Amino acid sequence: MSDPLILIFLSSALFLGWSLGANDAANVFGTAVGSRMVSFTKAAFICGIFVILGAVVSGAGAAQTLGKLGSINAIGGSFMAALAAGLTVYWMTRLGLPVSTTQAIIGSIMGWNFFSDSYTDLSSFSKFCRPGSSAQSYQQSLRR
């Protein structure tokens, strides 16, 4: 695979990361930046550091949990799943609607599995649908 093609495929992951960061950073620092307690540049820098730190420390656990839902076994599928989740979070944030990044990612994985006629583990999906399931799984991962 040539280098420009890899950059094109990575662009959807970068867009997803950007839209997730924009949504989550606004939730965390929106009031502080709006009241001028913290400058926009300082808030963006702090969020960037902690997003990278969180991905490094806890990213494997989240990927393993989402991997139980179903696998995307093609690079084109990964591109489309990341693009779909990124566009969902971007437009919902832009329209000022509440959005769950977890739901966007789960929806994009299930959408790709439906499109490619791949297996989706519905018992894993039902665990995501329970109220408070993400908080419970996070607490369980801390106990291990």
Image (cartoon, rainbow, N blue to C red):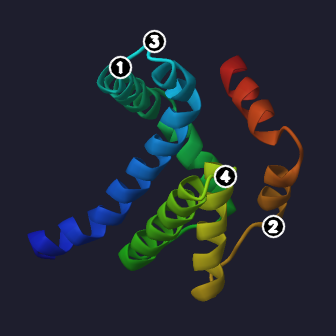
Marks 4 and 1, the one that precedes in the sequence: 1
- Residue that badge 4 annotates: 99
| Residue 123 pos. (x, y %) | 84, 61
Please state which of residues 102 and 29 is positioned toward the viewer in this rendering. 29
Tell me where residue 24 appears, x and y as whole percent: 54, 38
Are there few (<14), some (14-19), or many (20+) residues within 10 Å of tag 1? some
Structural distance between the alpha carbons of marks 4 and 1 = 25 Å
Q: Earlier in the sequence, mark 2 or mark 1?
A: 1
Label disc, if present, on residue 39 of the rendered structure:
1
Closer to the observer: label 2 or label 1? 1
Which residue appears at 67% of the width and 50% of the height?
100
Q: Quadrant location of the C terminus?
A: top right
The residue at the point 42 percent across, 76 percent down is 74
Give the structural element (helix, strand or loop) at label 2: helix
| Horizontal and vertical percent position of residue 46 | 37, 21
Type of the residue with mark 3 = Met
Residue under numbered circle 2 = 122
Residue that mark 3 sits on: 37
Q: Quadrant of the N terminus?
A: bottom left
